[in-house]
Image (spheres, rainbow, N blue to C red):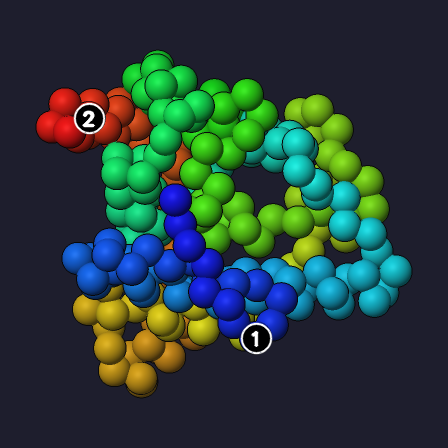
Amino acid sequence: MPKKKKSPGPTSRLVFPQDEQKHDWLSLLLEGYFITDQGVAKGIELMEKQGAKLACAKGCSHCCATHRSIPAYPLELIGITWYCTEKLEEPFRTPLLAQLMEHKHGDACAFLIDGVCSIHPLRPMACRQFNVFNKPCEKDEDAYYTRRKDVMNPIKKYTNKAFSVMMPFYGVTDRAQKRHVVENGLMHNMAKDMQNLNWASLARKMMEFDAQQ
């Protein structure tokens, strides 16, 4: 299971020491998520100062079941693949394998198991940043469209910093290049819709890994 490194501020960075030594990309991803989570915490704080009350809570998963388009970037997809293959344990592993094999476009998120996100530590930025206020979402409601004012706007400063931290994975290391990519929204061109991906291939990787243990 992941360990947490205490850091100043409202969140802690996930750490997988041995795996981060093996995979250079993992530290980039976890640092990007740490920055994203800090931005989310700050965004929630600002909304609450304006009188809004966070409606998202443990046990609520309507957005996971309702949203038909969930973007994830290539580095995030590698992280999800790694986490599911090498880290995910029961009670999620067995039902997730079956669900991945059967998942088709239009279903709820492939990683939603009995109302719980099975990949919560490695969930994409899009999921981390989607926060709804004032009242919980109704079944089949996408609050982004039904009551946009109740959906938090991610703080661009944190989002851009998270993207910048992750960019070396894509071969972008120069500061000016990073700024160009961020300012022109080029990162978004790489995003994949999680609903359209072949998750059966991930299930097969997980089974191959299990067979080798």
Query: Residue at 71% across / 46% down in the picture?
Result: 132
Point out residue 113 in the picture as x, y percentages from the top left corner.
Answer: 49, 24
Q: Circle 2 is placed at which residue position? A: 210
- Give whichever of 92, 132 is nearer the camera: 92
Is the residue 45 above or below the residue 179 in the image? above
Which quadrant, please, contains the C terminus?
Answer: top left
Is the residue 190 above or below the residue 58 in the image? below
Point out residue 139 in the picture as x, y percentages from the top left corner.
Answer: 70, 24
Can the viewer see residue 173? yes
> Is 162 left or right of 175, judged from the image as shown?
right
Q: Residue furthest bottom?
A: 176
Tally of numbered tags: 2
Q: Name the amino acid type tagged 2.
A: Asp
Q: Name the amino acid type tagged 1.
A: Pro
Report the disc number at residue 8: 1
> Is 124 left or right of 130, judged from the image as shown?
left
Spatial distance from mark 2 to mark 1, Cα to Cα? Answer: 38 Å
- Give whichever of 20, 108 is nearer the camera: 20
Is disc 1 placed on a helix, strand or loop?
Answer: loop
